[in-house]
Structures are given as C-alpha cells and as structure tokens.
Image (cartoon, coloured by chain):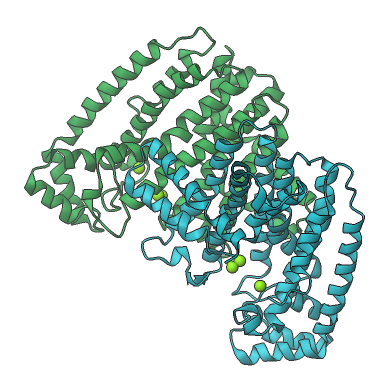
Chain colours: A green, B cyan
Amino acid sequence: MSDNKSKFLAEFPKIVDELKQDLAQYGMPSDAVEWYERSLNYNTPGGKLNRGLSVVDTFAILKGTTATQLPSEQYSKLALLGWCIELLQAYFLVADDMMDRSITRRGQPCWYKIEEVNEIAINDAFMLEAAIYKLLKSHFRSEPYYIDLVELFHEVTFQTELGQLLDLITAPEDKIDLSKFSPAKHSFIVIFKTAYYSFYLPVALAMYVAGISDPKDLKQAQDVLIPLGEYFQIQDDYLDCYGTPEQIGKIGTDIQDNKCSWVVNKALELANAQQRKTLDENYGRKNADSEQACKKVFQELNIQQHYLQYEDSVAKELKTRISQVDESRGFKQAVLTAFFDKIYKRSK
Amino acid sequence: MSDNKSKFLAEFPKIVDELKQDLAQYGMPSDAVEWYERSLNYNTPGGKLNRGLSVVDTFAILKGTTATQLPSEQYSKLALLGWCIELLQAYFLVADDMMDRSITRRGQPCWYKIEEVNEIAINDAFMLEAAIYKLLKSHFRSEPYYIDLVELFHEVTFQTELGQLLDLITAPEDKIDLSKFSPAKHSFIVIFKTAYYSFYLPVALAMYVAGISDPKDLKQAQDVLIPLGEYFQIQDDYLDCYGTPEQIGKIGTDIQDNKCSWVVNKALELANAQQRKTLDENYGRKNADSEQACKKVFQELNIQQHYLQYEDSVAKELKTRISQVDESRGFKQAVLTAFFDKIYKRSK
Ligand SMILES: [Mg+2]
Ligand SMILES: [Mg+2]
Ligand SMILES: [Mg+2]
Ligand SMILES: [Mg+2]
Ligand SMILES: [Mg+2]
Ligand SMILES: [Mg+2]
C-alpha cells in the first residue's frame, strides 16, 4: 500500500472514535454504539479510496506542496473531508447493493447480507450519510465556507440520487426493454450517478478549503471533471466487455445484467434490423449463449474501434480545455492534469 | 376535513411542482420526473398532518394571531416548513415499512409493496429527504436563520435514526429476548424515534422563523415537548393493548409483534418469576393464545392502574413546567398548552 494511502487510512479510526463518542453523549446504550462502529468500519474503508485521497492531493497542488508536507492539523482536516466522501459512497453502496440484490462487495458479503443486519442496513445507510453532517459541523462550523460545504454535499447527493433513479427505472434487471436505452440517458446516468460525487466533489471541497472557490473557478473545474468522469465510466463499461479478467479483477457481467452500458448504447445506435433483433432477444439474459450472441453483434459493429475513436476525441478535447484554464485567481491546471493522467488509457 | 387542514393540503401541489421543475432543469427525462412526482404524492400527504400543521399553528400563537389570519405569503412559508417535516416523516416511513416488512400504510399498500417499485423505494426515500434541503435552500437561503434550519433538520434526523436503530436491535420481530428490554431503553427509543421530530421540531422551526430562538427558549420548549412526546408514545403503547378497535381505528398488534412497548416494560419491572416465565414464553409469538397469556399477566399486575398513575404524574409535572415558562423573550406558554391539550386523556 502506498504511504499516501496508509496515512489517509490512519485518520479513519479517529473519525470513528469521534462518532462513537457523539453517540455515547446522547446516552445510546453500548450495543447500539458498537453496531454503528461495526457499520462504519465494514462499509467505509476497503475501497480504492481514490475519491478521499483526491481531496488531500488537490489541496496540496493548489497550495504548491504535497500531501506529505502538509502540517498535520491541516492534513487531518482535508483527510476528514475525504472521509466524508467515502462515507457518502458507503451510504450509496449499502443501498445500491440492496437495490441490485448484490451478494458481495469488495470481497466480502454485502452489508445487508449479514444475517443480523438484513433490512436494518437501510437505517445504517441513513446513519452513514448523517455522519457527514456531524463531522462537517464539528470541524468546519466556524469557517466562512461551512454552508458551502453543507450545500455542496446536499447538491451532489441529490445529483447522485437522480442518476441512480434513472438507472433503476431504465435498466431494471428483470424487465428488459432496450427501447428505453439511449445515448442521452446513458450520459445522464453516468454523469449524475458517478461523475459529480467521484470527480467534481473532491476537487470542489479542496477548492473551498483553499479559498479558491470563485464560481468561475468551480465552473472551470466542473467543465473538465464532469466529462472526465463520464469518460471514466465509459472506460469502465468498455472494460467490462473487453477487458481481461486479469486486467479488471473480475468477470464482466454488464450484458447479462441488462446494464445501460456505453457498449450496448453504441451498438443500438449502429445496429441494422437483424442485429437489433439479436440484441432484443439476447441482451440481459442470464446465460452464456445469449451473452455470446450480443458480443458477436458488438464485434460486427466494430464497437472496439468506436471506443478508441471516442477515447481519442474526448482526450483531445479535455487536454485543450485544461490548457485553456485561467489560473489568474489561483486555480491550477495541474489539479485537472493529475486526474486526467490517472485515467487516460488505464487498463484497470 | 377542517379548513385548517385543507388550506395546508392546498400548499402541497405547489411544492410538488417546484420539485418537478427542479428535476426538469437538471435535464431529467420525463419518466423519471413522473416517478418522483408519484413518490412524493403517494408518500407525503395522507397522514394526520399534525406535525406539519403545528408549525403554522405555533407561529400564529407566537405572533398573537391565528393560522387563517396570517398574510398569504407568510402562511405559505410556514406551511412549507410544515411540509418539510411531512417529507422527513415520509422518508422515515418508506424505510420503516421496508425494515418492518409491513404490508399497508394509511389504508394503501406500502410504497415498496408496489410491484414496479420494490427496492427502488430505498432511493425514493433518499429523494424524499433530499427534497427538504432543496426547499430550505430555495425559500430560506437569504434568511439569517437558514443554517439553523438546516442544522436542526440534520440533528433531528440523526436523533430519529438513533431511536430507530435502538428499536431495531432491541426488538427484532424474529428474535425474541425480553432481557434486552428495559424502561431506560424504552424511554430512549420513544424520545429519539418519535418525540424529537414530532414534537420539538415543529415548534423549533416556528420559533426560528418568528425570531424567538434564544437557546434558553429552545430549551424551555424542549423541556416540555420531549416528555410530552414520550407521554404521547406511552399512550400509544397503552391504547394498542387497552384501546378498543373503535377507539384506535385498528387492532393492536404490539404483543404479537414483539414491540418494546411501555406496557411490557412495566410488566417486566413488576413480574414475579412465574409471570416472567409466562411472558418469556408468550410475548412476541404470533398467535392469539400467547397474546392472551400475556394480557392475563398484565391484568394480574394492574398495568392499567400503573398507566393511570403515570399519566396523572406526568400531566401534573408538565402543567407545572408550562406554568413556569419564562415569557420575557417572547416565547409563550400557550404554544405548549396547545400541544398538551391535544394529547392529555386522548382516547385515539
Ligand atoms: Mg450495484
Ligand atoms: Mg445499481
Ligand atoms: Mg461497470
Ligand atoms: Mg413500522
Ligand atoms: Mg419500525
Ligand atoms: Mg403503536
């Protein structure tokens, strides 16, 4: 594990302690305090932590330094905001796994799959979200940008819920209807469900703390990070179909799961009547033959080629936008370049 | 329906319209906008609306007027806060019904029981909560007490979630263990799960808008409203066991549902070894004979008598507290008396 990541992880137990003390101060019995502790620890760390780490890294770039060189108090404050994003993600994932009826997450049973937990996971998800506002209040209440942080979390949370809703009603696993899919819906789902909280949120949080939060600068950040987040998810969709299990660390299941993926949307755009019929009859079906039939259509339509074209053009466009970012108020192109470089042509 | 209630109800379609327009402005496709509209209308009105109405009524009392005499713009603003409480309640109830695996709510199927909805209800609950902060932002952002409203909703939401958690782990329907019950836990569950959002929240909201929100006054309100809310729930527990179906509009099920009710807690406090054994063997069992065996123990222990004693003493204490409320900064005893009178010796 990188030093960066282990330093960030070392902040989490302090946060859990603070939240436990908060519960104890309400007079919560110890079994309930332990329950909350277990939910926090089970659901929050354990992912890649890219979102959380990005808050610290972005702040460091804005201040012309590195994460490791930040004074320890300042580091903890930024890391706490990073952990707030991880808590937000935990809130979404606990719920998403229930809604998707998933079995495992990050190599362990989904939280709601634990026998004693079950539907209590819903209230646990609520309490993961509530932790964000507890922490913001206790650490940022006296800052002039406190209300901006609170409103930003509200806004991004709502955007993510909008993306989730559209995803859920467009591509339910048990009711396949490809006529509901469209490139516009795919773009909306991806941007709202992923890009805002994963790409824009960490940068915007760091910008507020750094005092570089002119609406023009927030817009400059958003104008790059949202299409970058969309590109990231399109890569994810692409790799689900075309990545090797060694590359992506799992076997892709989007076709069998009726996912409103970039791949199928591109195919629907290009398909002739016969190919469309094949997709209608095979997409979202839970068997290998149907999956193969879809993949054959994708092959005929040269989806891989179309992906590479999309990737080239979006990369070019993003590089141009980044190079045109106005740094006069203190915002830095390097913040965006750091994100771009992590994502461009990744294979996992 | 009272004029008061129909006037309040007439505000809701405006709120739904505002939220729909908000979604449209994000570019949400119309099927998703309609989904949200349906969830808002299905889950938010339809209850007694006491909480929402209390915001308007409290404000009117503080201003020495009545709800009907408020200028229409002011009425709408207070009613909007009332609807924010109803949205908060909708968020809790959608989730509570899933966690309790309930079948109906307010004479219709629970939202998650609707065939197309199912687990999507979780995300719908999230979006009911998010509506609160959307509305606060669009209607109160320029008020000096805006952050107080936001923090109050966060705080009360968290308190309710704490009560819900303790309730869920103390009294799961399928794992009966009366040794987990205690009067202290009952009191915590009731106060946190119900009293804060149902009694304190409406009054505190009205106090902020009226500009009568000195921490001393908020504390005066809380010191009466929290025990009053506890009393209300204890009545509810009592009526579930001793009210006639005509009185309470349903057949009580707390005994069969293994509820951590005031009645069983009082009985556990007073039971001898034999009676305790009967309760251990029969409470929470889903059959009429076991229920009768529990009721027989309650009878032997004179629970009704103990309830009347509790009611007398809490009523006396609350009347004393109300009479001692300091009105010098503008807070009024009449606010608390109005609540007290609605609840004392109610039979439904
Ligand atoms: Mg999922
Ligand atoms: Mg999902
Ligand atoms: Mg994927
Ligand atoms: Mg229930
Ligand atoms: Mg319940
Ligand atoms: Mg009851």
Quadrant in which residue B261 is drawn: bottom right
Viewer-side residue, A268 vs A305: A268
- Whereabouts is ligand 6, in terms of quadrant? bottom right
Q: Is residue B261 visible?
A: no
Task: Determine the residue positioned at 40% across, 36% down.
Answer: B26
Q: Is residue A191 left or right of residue B320?
A: left
Asked whether residue B24 is in view, the answer is: yes
Q: How many marks?
A: 0
Q: Is residue A65 or residue B74 the one in the foreground?
A: B74
In this rendering, the answer to whether A304 lies above or below B284 is: above
- The residue at the far top in this view is A328
Q: Which quarter of the image is occupied by the N terminus of chain A?
A: top right
Coordinates of residue B136 in the picture (x, y in percent): 59, 40
Q: Is residue A29 above or below residue B219?
A: below
- On the image, the x and y values in percent for residue A222 come to 44, 24
Q: What residue sits 23% from the left and 41% below the top?
A: A265
In the rendered image, residue A85, in percent from the top left (x then y), is placed at: 55, 36
Horizontal side of B336 relative to A77 (left or right) equals: right
Q: Is residue B53 left or right of residue B273?
A: left
Q: Quadrant of residue A138?
A: top right
Q: Position of residue A133 (x, y in %)?
A: 64, 40
Q: Nearer the viewer, residue A288 or A337?
A: A337
Tell me what residue is drawn at x 49 percent, y 21 percent: A218
